Image (spheres, rainbow, N blue to C red):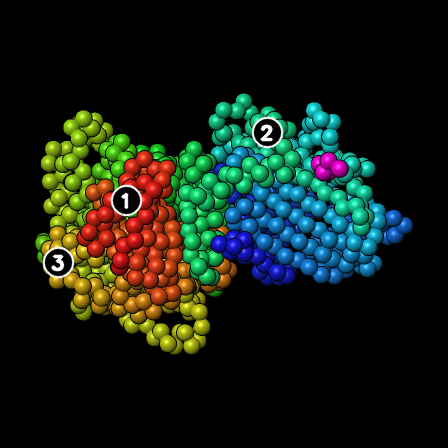
Amino acid sequence: MTDADWIWSYDGYDPPAERLREALCTLGNGYFATRGAAPEAPAGPAHYPGTYAAGLYNRKPTLLAGRRLEHEDMVNLPNWLPLRFRIHPDGGPDGDWFTPDDAAGGELLLHRQALDMRRGTLNRWIRYRDAHGRHTHVEQSRLVHMGDPHLAALRTKFTAEDWEGTVEVESAIDGMVGNTGVARYSDLASHHLTVMQTGAAADADDDPGIVWLRCRTGESDIRIVVAARTRAEPDGEPEHIRTHQSDFRVSQVLTLPVGPDRPAAVEKTVALHTSRDPAISSPLSAALDRVRRAPDYATLLDSHLMAWDRLWRHAELEVPGEAGHVLRLHLFHLLGTLSPAHTAELDVGVPARGLHGEAYRGHVFWDELFVLPYLNLHFPDLSRALMNYRYRRLPEAMRSAAAIGRGGAMYPWQSGSDGREETPEVHLNPKSGRWLPDNSRLQHHVGSAVAYNVWRYGQVTGDTEFAHSRGAEMLFQIARFWAESAVYDRQHERYRILGVLGPDEYHDGYPDRDTSGLDDNAYTNVLAAWVLARAVDLARTLPRSRRAEVFERVELRAGETDEWDDISRRLRVPFHRGVVSQFEGYGDLAELDWDAYRSRYGDIRRLDRILESEGDSPNRYQASKQADTLMLGYLFQPRELAEIFHRLGYAEMDDDMWRRTVDYYLARTSHGSTLSGVVHAWVLARTRHGEAWTHLRDALASDVADLQGGTTEEGIHLGAMAGTLDLVQRGLTGLETREGALLLDPAPLPELSEYAFSVRFRGVAVRMRLQPGQMRISVPEWEEAPACVVLHGDAVEIAPGEERLLPL
């Protein structure tokens, strides 16, 4: 790959697009991340600087229409970016503070941003002519350090092309921030920081010193400190240095000589610490000490590059063309949000929108279902850490189940700091301006996603220590919840699960009922049956040394697994017109005139908002937001899916019925979620290449082209990004992990017929290169064990240092 393959760039300044660019140019290291906002631009319509620490939440009440609503947000932390400048030419009028919007009263001649994914830096070039005709060139580079998770740095270089004088630089830390990045949350309380204080500390080297700002979150009472050191580069001595303080902002002002042959540069180094950090005496002393000891920008950059280089070696991916370019961006943001080096040390889950913005309030949904399969084959320790987030919240999930009269664990649809249900009670439809009930907390299938991840992790890694302890506890408690949720229906002679929501989200009830929830959602019931069966298998195969302890911890009753086994074979799945019904009664709903709505509105991805604004409801129609029933084809190979249905007693489920089911829902889905493209591409990859590529192309474009219309600027869609990576890694290669071997059954798309990647399976690195008609597989010579690969039923053992060419 060339250097250009690693660069994601934007030429020109485009205010309506800047917030989208800021999200896609976010830099992170798994501990914290900062959006790619211009350092000199405050928050406003065109810009939204935001810095977020993984798992740092605060709860805040809001009075809305006479109701007291509580919501917990991932907190926007004090802004460390601010750095503005203006020129003072010798003998000429002073310039105004520069902003890209007015170019100091002149003209912006050049504005280019380039995200260097390989190096983990965001670079920017500006050239402008001010109101008096003077030309100035500015070059900036920033990093959020991948080696030291508490450090970030910004370097700015000024060149006076046709004038001499000084440049005045103000470097600040700004505490006047709130969670105001999502317009539809504007009616909700948004300021989470309190008890703010600023100060300055002398540096031992007698340079300009260090300024700092400390504060607390209002309810969670987390102390936060940001410390900054701003210096001129060693060969440039500032003429003046001044410090300005208020309760909410602290700054240093440097005046530097500059001329055509004398450029000037400043380096701003920042340390972030919170009271959650281990091995510190206080956040203030830790931040001051860290920023004092931090080296210059060039040295920081060297160690930062080494850390990123290690990550890229573990996550090799070579996909040619535009698809490869986007996939690298997806992988960059996955690693910046969930860094194996740092996230694995934290108590955090998978934030659905990354650390890139405030949409969904930074909550954890089921998106780990799309993220962990990729991580399992590259960074299994990180997968385990993310599942430990769920394990630590198992007691809260059990309390939630008990609150509705059931045993086991009911995981929340939206999770935050302590694992309680964070799904809001109401949500705003921006199309109609109305606040509506939010019933998505009925998506209890999130528990099955947790169980699925636990089981698949054990298959891939062979980590029996986790699978037979914490993993087993979660699996058993989730299975118990499903067993106690199932009610026996004598008419059908089947167990049923009533009053839930599936992944679709358009349907939250029946049009003729006042209550919320749907009955016998196929995805929910099939996955619940699978979870119960896996729990039974595990209970029977647990080693004797583990069995008594785990059974005691979950208080497993005599005969309870026999009940699970019975329910797992008799859960009801509805059918209509020769296809699987999304839920009981789906086939009785009215058909939507799709052509009419497309003609009237063009983009109908958010059909629910369109219908509600018309006084209608998607509950009346056979119309789905995203894959629901078809999610089963994403989680299970056709062989596995047939086995599950046959175990349930539905022998009529065969390839023909599944194809009919796929066709049926494809024609009735609006793809109002970025995850929809991933799932449909996966399901279609082996049967209809053209349609699979269309959906994959949409999934690749969903964030970079903001296909959902204004959502990406509020935070990237991490599940969709990881899902595209996993589609290339497992979906198109048919990669499965079973009985200590890698099973392959490639079905490449014509548009992606040649690419390469590596995985780590049972501690051994395996490199694969898919080519037309063949597959090259090798194990690096430094590995100590061989890898077993099974292609079309033929097993091949590949020794360290060996490469095998296998025909397809």
Quick one: 542 or 491, which is closer to the camera?
Answer: 542
Name the dominant secondary structure of the magenta segment. loop
* Residue designated by label 2: 290
Q: Are marks 1 and 2 in contact (CB under 8 Å)?
A: no
User: Is residue 638 at least partly visible in the picture?
Assistant: yes
Q: Position of residue 205 (x, y in %)?
A: 71, 26
10 Å crowding of disc 1: few (<14), some (14-19), many (20+): some
Disc 3 secondary structure class? loop
Quick one: 532 or 34, which is closer to the camera?
Answer: 34
In space, the residues marked 1 and 2 are separated at their CA atoms by: 47 Å
Q: Position of residue 242 (x, y in %)?
A: 77, 35
Amino acid carrying label 2: it is Arg
On screen, 75 above or below 721?
above
Disc 1 secondary structure class? strand
Of tags 1 and 3, which is closer to the observer?
1
In space, the residues marked 3 and 2 are separated at their CA atoms by: 63 Å
Q: Quadrant of the C terminus?
A: bottom left
10 Å crowding of disc 2: few (<14), some (14-19), many (20+): many
- Quadrant assignment, res 660: bottom left
Asked if the stretch drawn in magenta spans residue 653, the answer is no
Of tags 1 and 2, which is closer to the observer?
1
Q: Is residue 435 left or right of residue 451?
A: right
* Residue designated by label 3: 650
Q: Are marks 1 and 3 in contact (CB under 8 Å)?
A: no
Q: Position of residue 557 (x, y in %)?
A: 15, 33
* Residue designated by label 1: 798
Q: Which residues are magenta?
A: 231-235
Residue at position x 40%, y 74% in the image: 597
Amino acid carrying label 3: it is Tyr
